[in-house]
Image (cartoon, coloured by chain):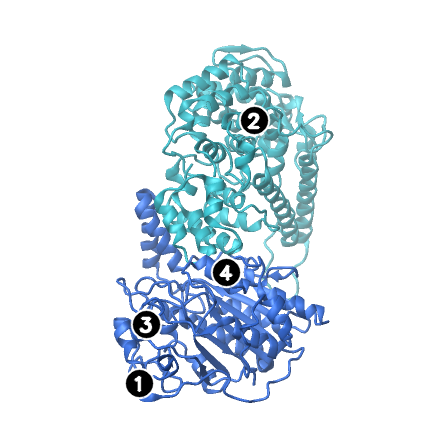
Amino acid sequence: MLTKDAAIAANRFGLGARPGDARSIGSDAKGWLTGQLEHPPSSAPAGAPESARVLAEVRDLRVARQVAAQARANLVRPPDSNAPATPPGIDQQAIREFGSFVRERYVAQTAERHRLAIETDRPFVERLVHFWSNHFAVSADKQPLAALAGLYEQEAIRPHVTGNFYDLLLSVERHPAMILYLDNQASMGASSQAATLVRRNRGGALGLNENLAREILELHTLGVDGGYTQADVTEFAKVLTGWSIGGALGEGRPALARLGGDLGKPGEFHFRAPMHEPGDKTILSKRYREHGADEGEDVLRTLALHPKTASHLATKLARHFVADEPPAKLVERMANAYLKSEGELTSVYRTLIEADESWREPVAKFKTPHDFAISAYRLLGFTPDNLQPVTAFLTQAGQRPYAPGSPAGWPDTAANWNGGDALLKRIEFATAAGRRVGNNLNPTTRAGEVLGALGEHTTMSIRGAESGAQAFALLLASPEFQRR
Amino acid sequence: MTTRRSVLAGGATLTLLAPFARLSAAPNADSRFVLVILRGGLDGLAAVPPYAEPAYAQLRGSLALAKPGTQDGALDLDGTFGLHPALENLHAMYRAHEALVLHAAATPYRERSHFDAQNVLEDGGTTPNASGGGWLNRALAALASAGDSREAIALADSVPLVLRGELAVTSWAPSQMPETDDDTLARVRRLYEAADPELAASLNGALEAREIAGDAGDARMGGGRGGQAIAPLASAAARFLSSADGPRIAVLDANGWDTHANQGGAQGTLAQRLRGLDLGLQMLKTELGAHWLQTSVLVVTEFGRTAAVNGTRGTDHGTAGCAFLCGGAVAGGRVVADWPGLAARDLHEGRDLRATTDLRALFKGVLHERFGVSESALARTVFPSSDSVEPLDGLSA
C-alpha cells in the first residue's frame, strides 16, 4: 500500500504510480522527487539534429509539389471533357505524399512520447518535459509542425528542463520548429540589405513579423501583464530579424533565395545577416547595441532574469502541480528561489517540493486527458505495442498530442478538462482499458499499490463490480484516479 | 431425494442426463468450439424459466415471464421449461435439435464473489486460483502432446484466464474504443453522485445530451447501446474459425449480466442483453456456413442469481444457473437438468437455485466428444482431481 505522501509524490508530481513504485519511493517521498533532478534527462544531440533532416525532406517535398503542380497546370486538359479539371496549382499526388510523410513522422514521435511517459522511472522529470513543452508550445495543426513537434521537444526542451531557464529559452527560440511556428524565418528589418533589395527589384515591401517577439514576451517570459508595450514588441522583433533556418529560402524562387545570403546548414538555426535590422534597439527601457545574432541572446538573457518572468513561471508551475488557483505564498517563494539562483530551475522545483502547500489534501488538481491516459497504462503496468489508440483517445478528448492549436498551449485548469463529453470519453477509455486487463489483476490490490487508500465509495464500487474488467473501469473512472 | 428428482407441476418427468444411447460423432480435425462467457452472473431463471413450477411465478413476482402462448410469453422448450422470449434464434436452434439447455448447473464454487466465481469457472478447479491457468489452455496442451496442434483465439483485448497457461494463445479485438455499457456507466454515475458532485454533474449533463441526441445513431448490432455487443465478436469468431489454417477454438466474453436492479421481464435491460446474445449466436451460425455442422458453441456464466426478486426489481448473486450448448454438432432439442425444485426447502441456503450438475461435467463431455481429449487427461490435468465428475455424454449429434 502506498503511503499518503508516496501517493501524492507519484500522482501529483508524477504520471501516476506503477505497481512496485511503493518500493522505489520508500518513506522519503520528497527525496524520491529531488533525486530525479540530479541528472539532465538527456543531453543535446551531437551532430545534425533529426529535425534538420526532416526539414530538408519537407523542403524537397514542397519543391516537388510546386514543380509537379506547375507541370500539371501546363498540360492540356485530357480529351474526356467530363473529367473534372484539376484545380491549377494543386497536385493531388504530391499533396498525398507530403501528407503521408508528415503523418508517419507524427505517429512515430507521438508513440515515442507515450512510450517514454508510460515507462519512465523519473516521472517528475517527464512531467517537467511536458510542462515546458506546453509552456513553449508549437502546434501540429500548422504544417509542417506535425513532423517536427516531437523532435522539437526532444532537441530543444528535454535537455534543459533541469538546467537554467535561459538555456532552455535560448534553445527553444532558436529551434526551427519555433521559428517556423511563429513565422520568424522570413522576418526582415525595413532597413536591412534584403528589404532594400526587395524594394528595388519588385517594388513590394517585405518586413517585420512580430509574432515570435510578441509571444516570447507574452507567453514565454514576462507574461501578459509583464509591463511591455507595443513599441517593445516591435523593437524586439527587429532584434530577432535574421533568426531563421538554413537552406535555400523561398523554395525555388531564386530572387527570394538570394535575399538570405549565406545558406547556412539546411534545416538548422541560421542567422541571416542580410535580413537583420541594423542599429541599436531599446526594449523595456534598456538599450541594446547593434550586435547581430548576439543581440537576441542579450535580450533573452535580460528577459530570463526579469522578476516578472520569475513570477510568471512560478505561477504556472504552481498551478500545474498544486492547484488551479495556486497559493500566493508558494508562488512568491518559488519566484524568489528563481531570482536568487538566477534562473536555476531545480532551485524552483526544490522549493515546490519542500513546500507544505504541495502536500495538502484534499487533492486539488484534475488530470488532463493525457495524464489520465498515461497514468492508466502505468497503473495497469503495460505498454501497448500499438500506441495509436492513445493518440486517438487524446484527439477525441480534446488533447491531440502536440496540437494545442495555439502558442499558449493547453489550459491547465479543471474547468477545461472535466466537461461531460470528455468525461464520458474517459469512462469509455477506462472501460476499454479494463477489458484489456480483463480479470488478470486484482483491482483492490492494484489500487492500493498505485493510489494508496481509496475513499469508501470507490472501494465499495470496485468490490461490487461484476467482473475484473468492470472493477478496473471503475477504478480508472473513480474520482481518486481523475484527481491528484 | 424425491423432491429433487421429481417433478414439476403436472408431473412431467425430467429429462435426465444423457438419456440417449446415441453414438457420438467421432472427434475430428474439423471440430470447432466457441466458448462464450457471460460475466456478471446470468439469471438462469429468467433465461430459462421453469414456468410450470408454481413457485416460479411467486418468487419472481413482476419479473416472472408469462406462460408460452400468451403475450410476451416464454418460448416453450419441453412443457416444463421455456426460453426467454428474446432468445428467438436459440429457440429455433432448439427446435431444429441444434441447441441443448442445461439447467441447475454451477461450478464447485459456493460463495458469491464475481471475481472468484469467474476464476473457478475458468481455472477449472474447485477453489479460486487453484492452478493459475485455464482449463481450455490445458486441454489444448493435452491435445498438442497427442499430436493435435489446433489453436485457439480470444476475441478480446486480453486473453481471458480460461485460455491462459503454458501454450501461447492470441487475441483479437476491434481497435476502436467501444462505448461504455449502461451498467458500468450507471455504476460510475452512482460513484460520482456519492463521492464527487462536480464530476456527477458533469457526467449527468453529458448523459442527458446523449439521450437527446438519441441512440439510434450509435445503436450497435446485438442489442443497441446496452452492453458489450456480442454480435461483432461472434462475426469475427466465425471469420477466424472459417479460415483454412485458422484457429478451431474461440473464446469471447460479454459483460453486463449483473442485474441487481430493474432487470425487466419480457422487455427491459436483461431482455436487451439476451437479444444481443441471441443475435450473436445466430450470427455464428450464419457466418460459419457449412462449418456450423462441426461446431459446438457453449454459453456459460459464473453463477446464477437469487430465486426471488429483490427489493430493486432485480436479482442478487446466487448459485446455480443455466448453460447453453448449440451448434450443428450438438445433439440438441433437450433440456438436461436434475431439477432441484424451487420450493423454499429445495433452495440452496434458502435463496438460490441448488446446483445439481457440475459445469465441469459439461466441459469434459464437449472436450472428450468433440476433440477426443482422453478421459484420463480430463480427470488429471485439464480438471485436476476431478475423477468424481463424470463427463456428460451424448452431447454430440
Disc 1 and disc 4: Cα gap in Å?
36 Å
Q: Nearer the viewer, residue B224 or A448?
A: A448
> Do dots 2 and 3 share one subunit?
no
Q: Which mark is residue B9?
A: 1
Q: Which residue is mark 2?
A: A207
Q: Nearer the viewer, mark 4 or mark 2?
A: 4
**Residue at mark 2: chain:** A
**Can you say whether B250 is above or below A135 in the image?**
below
What is the three-letter code of the residue carrying label 3?
Gln
- Please tell me which of labels 1 and 3 falls first in the chain: 1
Letter of the chain that mark 1 sits on in the rendering? B
In this rendering, would A292 be left or right of B195? right
Query: How many neighbours does mark 1 have within 10 angstroms: few (below 14), some (14-19), or many (20 or more)?
Result: few
Quadrant the C terminus of chain A occupies? top left
Q: Which residue is mark 3?
A: B267
Please determine whether, in this image, residue A334 is positioned above or below residue B57. above
